[in-house]
Image (cartoon, rainbow, N blue to C red):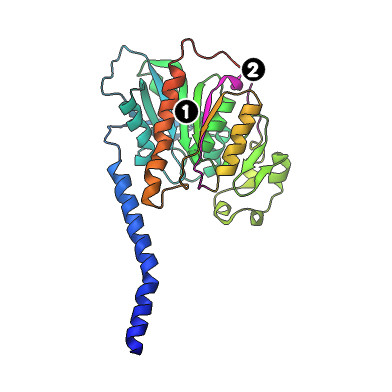
Amino acid sequence: MLGSVVASTCLVSTLPFARGQDSREEVRRLLARGDPAITRIRKTLSVNGSEREYFVQVPDDYEPRRTYWLLVAAHGGGGHGADQRVGRYGQWSERLGLEAIVVTPTFHQTDAAAVRFPSLGEGEFLKAVITDVRLKRKLREMILLTGYSRGGQFSHRFALQNPDLVFACAPQAAGSWTTPDGRFLMEGRGEVSNPAQVLASMDLSELQERWRANFSPQAVAPVAGLRAKQGAARIPFHVMCGKLDTRYPIAMDFATSLRELGYEVTTEWPRSPHGPTEPSHVEEWEKFRRRAIEFFLEVTSRRPPREPLGK
């Protein structure tokens, strides 16, 4: 009798784990079913003496004489330009009929600060990529820019510092934000006032554990609070973050800052965590890619484009 009781107890204790495993397998299956069936061309170029790569997708009905938007999609931490997740932007662009050539660069794999804060170097890499694509394709003067997670950090900061280059921006689920007036918002901490001074003296013990391995407060202190360049307020933004994501509060704060400073901003908050952990999250999580493309379709269809709201 004792043996049967013990065996029964052990079985019950493993059931939540088994259900968790089944749920994760179902999530992986659902995500794989949505993997984009698109062709991306790998390109390389030399930037500051290093060979770098980016990937290009052209529409199925590509016409060399036609002028296209250049849509840049920035991957998240640990990703790369050929990542299926970032490839979904190209998939939705093709499906929904955005007349765009989609570029997904592979950003720095070891220097996370340079990706989160493009003024530290990766912004120049993207400009080199854009120049390289222009040599071979007919493109509009300005680009469309999006990215998830670390890509969201890159995209909104690059846009605010390069308003002459970015037509519209859709940053998503960023772990930190820099508002146009130079306030630094950080996951788990909220607003860091006077970031140049506070970050320069911050101890790693003050950060969330997952930030400690790849975030150097001292390295980013000079650029974390950069104010937007003149003319940035003419850029329309579409800000997204999952309601179940720990980054949700600062995403709302960033969107509020845009609105209060006269920017055109729309928002959407899918019911998902930072990455889907249950089958019910998968459809919500896919909204990030689809809604970014729908946003770009809406803003690029205006005739003429929106006039600047301010400087």
Is 267 left, or right, of 216 in this rendering?
left
Q: Nearer the viewer, mark 2 or mark 1?
A: 2
Quarter of the figure with the C terminus: top right
User: Percent from the top left, x then y, of residue 187?
Assistant: 59, 46
Relative depth, front residue between 163 and 18: 18
Question: Is residue 234 rendered magenta in the image?
Answer: yes
User: Mark 2, residues whose alpha carbon is within 10 Å: few (<14), some, or many (≥20)?
Assistant: few
Can I make out residue 160 in this image?
yes
Quarter of the figure with the N terminus: bottom left
Mark 2 lies on residue: 310
Q: Please report the bounds of the magenta region as a residue range.
A: 226-245
Disc sitting over residue 145 in the figure: 1
Q: What kind of element bears circle 2? A: loop
Q: Residue furthest bottom?
A: 1
- Looking at the image, which residue is at 38% across and 78% down? 9
Q: In the displayed structure, would residue 82 be above or below residue 164?
A: below
